[in-house]
Each structure stands twice: as structure tokens, then as C-alpha cells.
Image: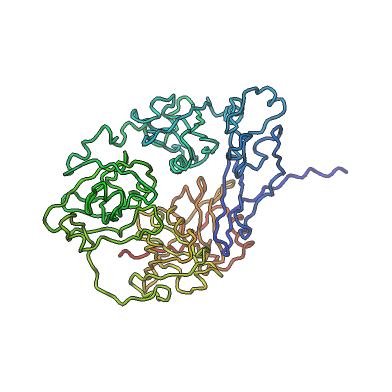
Amino acid sequence: MIPPPITPCKTPDRELIHDGNSSTFIDEIQNDENDTKISIKNKKDFCIATPPLPTTESENSSDEEDTQNMEGKTFTKAGVEIDRASAGNVRRSKEESAIDTEQEDCFGYTTCKLKKKYGSMGQVFMHVIIRKDNGYLGISLAGHRDRTKMACFIAGINPKGMASSTPLEIGDEIVEVNGIVLQGRSHLNVPTILKSIIGTSLKFVIIRRKPSADDLAVKPVTQFPLCLDEDEDVFAHYTNVRMVQIKKGNSGLGIMIIEGKHAEVGQGIFISDIQEGSMADMAGLHIGEMILAVNKDSLIGCSYETAASLLKKSDGVVVLKICNPNKTKETSTNSITSTSITVKGSSDAKACSASPDKATQSSRPVTPMPKKSPAKEVVDPSKALIVPNENTTIEIDTNNKPLGVVAVGSELNIHTDAVIIDILPDGIASKDKRLQIFDQITEINGNKINQDCSEKQLQKYLKDLQPKMRLTIFRSDVESTEKVEFDLMKKPGKQFGIGLRIHHPKGMILTEVLPGGIIELDGRLRKGDIITHINSESVCNLSHEDSSILLKTIQGKATFKVLRPIPKKR
């Protein structure tokens, strides 16, 4: 007797589970078929995933793209590093290679390769833009109007930018630049990627559809920021404006800057000190003068971090637009919003604020000075204990190793500063024993952590490996948290789309909110939330396996109880 056919059972949904002993994350990417590909970045991470299929590096491979491991980098025949998923690395059969007689460029591109990779998406073409000194592309970018889709579209082309003379159009999708794949990535990351590319040549791979502008998340951009070489009126109300050219040498410009507020001209970037005999000193700059622009980049409204970055990356002859708003009257009562920084190239340069003695010299204008706080007993930061309800500066010997804490920034769910949501077992912070969960971080190695500090900057500061790490911590005497409860509906074939860290004493930390998942679309759960219960079941001490089973088997209504850190405003 022939047995009846066996119907394959449905594979359960997969959720991310993160090992509490690791400080890295697991990335989840959802494709159109609701499948999941999980990339493990640390062997201590735990996840449920299908083992990858064997791949080959042969150029004449007939395997389809979706069966290959397209993560990471590779090299073209010309020795240029590109993404594995780039059209320059597309796999072709022997017949396709024989037909394609076009010589590959340094990124491995040919017309046939581009059509094979992106031809089904629309008209595909390449265009090269040569970046000029002190010039800018003049392209405004936007994402996809469908929030579940990551894309980078051209939303505007400035007629005064370099892109205005190219065949680029509003609505074009940028899928690659110089072998770097931008398809499926957020448009917010693209400017940083473009700035990181070395050299003056940018080769864009463009997809054009008709009607193309319908996919844009915003209306086409028609107004652009002022261009300094043509719109000088922006500086018309500043007094004593002049242009100063300084040749930047190996020791830098020799100036220190500070972000301050002047009674006459308002907020801006001011010169707080000048090294004697430096290029800036010889060029005639004075303490207290305001820097309006560096080359063609305006500093109006910029933070001191942005201004310092522009000054540091400037090379050769630097053109500064300077104004002198100071009068003979005393200006020391003007408020200062941040500490001073140095913008010198030499390693022996020391950062210090302009002293009152220098500020009163007749040869140099008066510099706005910060208000002095009452003197306090000086405590060694390496031994200082954190005092509740006040800022405490501590120093931890990290020996160029990670601190071992997990923190979330203000732009996600915190009103002020950042907050520690986990301290990793056996990490340096755990051994130091001074930091606690829900401590607020207000400063890391001199970098202010506030509402202006992005999540990316926060993580960069925390991961910056130094011999010592200096932190300014605020600890409330009462744990500043709130308990919230959410009901979510999980339909068949849908995923929560979250990354979790387990082995936390209070529950499971939500470390990632992935695009297109139930959590992201609902919008109420946030990164940094600590899930304590799911459907009245405590998840505080669940193992990897139990956590995975619980999340996979949930169907229909799911009730999440969450502990959310809410630091106090100060």
C-alpha cells in the first residue's frame, strides 16, 4: 500500500535572541518573501538561522545571486575593493561572459553586468562626477515613501552644484557608488558614505523609472541652502567682516575655538586662544573674533564639533570669513554653552580656555568667558564614587578594551543625556563596580552627550578604545523608570522584527527595531526598552532556547509589559 504524501509543515517565524555576554548586535534583513537572513557578528551571539548554502568565487558561475553569500568585500581584477553584492561582482555564466566584450572598469562594471544586476528594476546607467576643491555635489536625497522599503532617491538638484550639469534627474534611485552598494540602505547614511570615499571621482549607478518621483517620501526639493560665493547677504548684518587666508602647515592653524553667545551677534563660533607665532597669529587673527565660514562652508548655526571638523579637514590655503563683534565695553557676562577645543595638527598642542588676563589685553579683543561655579574639593576621578543627584566625573582604566556597557541615546527615547541599560558580566565596567544600570551619561572623554548627540555618535564614543575612559555620570536617588504595557497583533507570516539581549536581571533588552517588522510599524516599543513580561509570563530568567520558543510560537494578541528608563531633566 502506498503511503499518503506528506505535507511539509510551516517553518516557525524566527526572532533574534542576543547573548547577554556579548556587546555586539545581530542584524536581521527581511526580503519580499518574508524570509530571514541573519548575519552573526560574534561567536557568542545566539540566533536561529538556516545554515548558508555553499558558494563559489568563480566568475563563470551559473548560480543565482540569492544562493550566494553577498556579505562583505571583495577585490576587482584591477585590485579595487568593492562590495560583494556590487554589480561589478555579479556572477555570470560562461556564455554571458563570452558575449560581453566590453572591458571592465576599475570597479568591475560593464553595461551587461549592470543590466543583469539591476535591469529588472528600470533603466540603468552610470555617470561620473568629478569633485572639485571646495565644491559640492548639490544633490538632495530622500527615502522611499513606503517606510518598509529602504532606498536612496534624488529629491532635488541644486542648479549651483556640480550635479546640475549631469543627466541626473529628480526621482533617480542611486543604487551604487564606486562599487559600494546603496540599494536597500537608508538615504540618511549616504552623505557619510560619499564623504568617506577617497579621491575626486564618483561613479554613480542610477535606476530610472517612469513616473520616478512618485516613490519619493518628500516633495521634490526646489529651495537649497545659500551658496557663500553668490549670497554674501547672509553676513550683511555682521560688523567688521573680512576675509583671511591662512596657509595651514604641519602644526595646524594654531587657534582654539569655542561655541559661545555674544550680546551683539548671538550664538556662534569664536576664537578663544591663539598660539603665539602660529600661522593664525601671523595672519592677524584675534581672540574673541567670530568665524563665520571656513572656505565655502558656513559656520552659522553650527556646533563646535562641526566647526572643529571643518577646520581639521581643511588643507592648504584656508580661507576664513571673520568678523569682530567686540566693543570696548565689558563682555564677560555673555554665556558660553560648551568647553573649548583645540584645532591643531601637532600632538603637543594643549587645549585650554582663554584666560581672563589675555582677555583684558588691549591688543586683543575680549573673549566671552563662562561663569565660574563655586569651588569644590578636587577628587581623583579614578577613585571618585558616584554621588546621587549631581554630576560626578569618574575615570576607568580600560587598557584599550571595550567598557562593557550598553547605552541608548537621547534621540531614541531619552529626554536628556544617554542612559546605561545593561552592564555586561565580566566586562571592565562590571569589574570597576561604580556604574549602575539606569545611570545617565552626560559626557564621554570630553564629548557632551545631550539631545544634539546622535545615537551613532554615542556608540562611537563608547566604542572608542582608549587607555582610560573619563565619564561624567548623573545618578538619581530614585530609579527613574516607568512601566508601560502594549498589546500587539501578530499575524501568520509576520515577524516582530526585533533584536534582543537576554540574561539581563530585569528582562530582555530591545536592542534593535528592524524596518518592516510589527514593532517598527506599531511604533510604541523603542530601542532600550526592557521587556519584563510577555502575555503575563516573566521573561527575566529565560534561557536562549525558551526565549526563542516563546517568541516564535506567539500568534494573535501579545501583551508586552515593559520597563522604560526615563532619566530626570536637569
Would residue 94 appear left or right of 244 to someone viewing this image?
right
Residue toward you, 327 or 146? 327
Decide which of 451, 256 is in the foreground and name it. 256
Q: Is residue 147 visible?
A: no
Image quadrant in which the C terminus is located: bottom left
- Snapshot quadrant of residue 338: bottom left
Residue 143, image x, y percentages:
44, 38
Name the image colouring: rainbow
Count of numbered marks: 0
Q: Position of residue 206 (x, y in %)?
A: 50, 29
Instruction: Identify the residue at image location x=21%, y=63%.
Output: 356
Residue 15: percent from the left, percent from the top? 59, 53
Quadrant showing the N terminus: top right
Q: Is residue 554 visible?
A: yes
Relative to 451, does residue 138 appear above or below in the rendering? above
Taking the image as shown, residue 142 lies to the left or right of residue 34, namely left
Q: Who's the residue at 33% across and 43% down the image?
A: 247
Q: Check the image and name the residue furthest to the right.
A: 1
Residue 456 point in image, percent of width and height:
44, 52
* Residue at horizontal 37 percent and vertical 44 percent from the top: 314
Q: Is residue 258 left or right of residue 99?
A: left
Q: Nearer the viewer, residue 424 or 560?
A: 424
- Residue placed farthest to the left in the image? 329
Q: Is residue 129 above or below residue 50?
A: above
Towards the viewer: 221 or 129: 129
